[in-house]
Image (tube, rainbow, N blue to C red):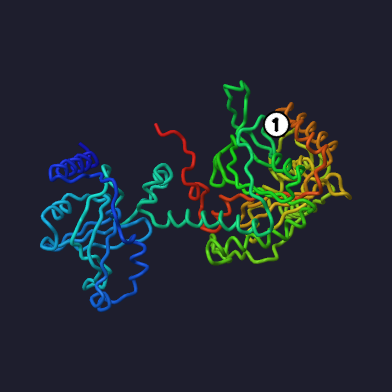
Amino acid sequence: MSTEEEQIQQRRANLAELERLGVNPYPHRFERTAAVTELVAAHGDKTGTDLEAHKVETITSGRVLGIRNFGKASFLVLSDGRSRIQAYIKKDSLSERDFGIFKLVDFGDVVGVEGHLFRTRTNELTIWARRVEFLAKCHLPMPEKWHGLTDVEIRYRQRYLDLAVNPEAREVFQVRSRVLAALRQFLDSRGYLEVETPMMQPIAGGAMARPFKTHHNALDVDLFLRIAPELYLKRLVVGGLERVYEINRNFRNEGISTRHNPEFTMLEFYQAYSDYQDLMTMTEEMVPFVAMSATGRDTFEIDGDTISLRAPFARLSLRHAAAAAASTTLGAPVTESELRDQASARTIAGRLGIAVDPKSGAGKITTTIFETLVEESLVQPTFVYDFPTEVSPLSKQRPDDPDTVERFELYIGKMEIANAFSELNDPVEQRKRFEQQLAERAKGDQEAHAMDEDYVRALEYGLPPTAGEGVGVDRLVMLLTNSKSIRDVILFPHMKTKN
């Protein structure tokens, strides 16, 4: 029998003994006067003399994350997931029943304690227990008591265990909650309306990505889990809702990495009578506001770099950046004009050792060069703007340059955090772009955008000049919590099936 199996058997034996004592191991409720964190916050700075003079009575509860025995005296370390406090257990201070409960408590059990606060000889804030209640049994062995849970895969698969023993994990998700609240506050204060759009859509639109497919039995139609809410939000702007946003769950049937999860959270917002320049300015205000609201600071240390989120952010033209990086790498001049020509762009990519799809045009090749050579250098907040039209089927072209659209991506800490553009609102041009995407799909590009006839029809009713932006909430939380993987900031990330 393994050590773990022996522990499980012992825990079950202790549970059976509790029941023989007449203890209900799963009571319906427990009345407490304060959580552990509240006790520590209220009394953590009080001296032993203060506590003796005022004799603070309390009833609290928590998971047992430590059991210490010192002859006639023992201690239970209780945690509510955020803070810890110890309970002093003395046989002559408890009833026979309650001391019997204590003797059967295992590491990880949930218990309640009633008593008064004092400080031990080592000056540790402690509850002198006069009552112990058993609240829930932990049947399985917990991680080693003072070292927490360090196995990354177990942390992701068993997030409940991660939260129970790693306070830093809970803090990440508290920051995440504050980020969402701050985004809403920022947009609500500017007259935006929060809306909800379909998560199951007849056409997967609004982004260039592979969708998940399902089938609606009653309607007998195939549907797709949304890859973006964009086209529905812009329909609302056509309908007269001039400022709308949605904090939405998106689904993309693509690879998994430290920055990609098949299910992720985006903020998307649209503002009528604006262009991408307006959203650059707004984003420079929004990002530091959210950072300060969620963490109390706007400067962060990440991988040895000090990143400041204070405006203004740097600005960088995509083609200029790609040409400059290619010139540096090759030790020979590369011009933006060369990157606008399909044949020369492909030749340059080959000289750089960058593989590109033979069917890709100059715009897609240039974007690939940029992503390969430049992205990893964008540590400080940087707006990369003016993208090739080929990779931006929903963006508005610059009036002086049909091969370029009014689009930007915001990079911070070597990650793309946001993507925005002046929205294409010419229905004729939009239909032409969709048809170009269909041609790419026919060549085998499974991420090419599908035709959406109803969206084109909506544009035919008139979409005013509009700018829209998507912000990767998960990546923003990664940045603000210095998390290395997107799985660290998603409560239940997708994992391979464990055989």
Identify which residue, 389 or 370, lies in the foreground. Answer: 389
Identify which residue, 74 or 362, lies in the foreground. Answer: 74
Give the number of callouts.
1
Left or right of 9 on screen, residue 492: right
Query: x and y percent of residue 96 in the render?
Result: 10, 55
Left or right of 340 on screen, residue 288: left
Left or right of 340 on screen, residue 94: left
The residue at the far right in this view is 400
Q: Which residue is drawn at 41% across and 46% down?
A: 159
Residue under pointer 1? 445
Mark 1 residue type: Asp
Using the rendered image of the protein, determine whether residue 350 is visible from the camera's viewpoint: no
Query: x and y percent of residue 263 in the render?
Result: 55, 40
Q: Residue at x 49, y 39 (%)?
A: 494
Query: x and y percent of residue 442 in the render?
Result: 74, 26
Using the rendered image of the protein, determine whether residue 94 is visible from the camera's viewpoint: yes
* Circle 1: element type: loop
Q: Which residue is drawn at 17% across and 51% down?
A: 101
From this view, report whether residue 129 is shown above or below residue 472: below
From this view, report whether residue 163 is shown above or below residue 430: below
Query: x and y percent of residue 254 in the render?
Result: 59, 36
The N terminus sits in image quarter:
top left
From this view, report whether residue 319 is shown above or below residue 446: below
Q: Which residue is drawn at 44% across and 33% down?
A: 497
The C terminus sits in image quarter:
top left
Graded by Cα atoms within 10 Å as few (under 14), some (14 to 19) or many (20 or more), the crowding at tag 1 reads some
Q: In which quarter of the image is residue 138?
A: top left
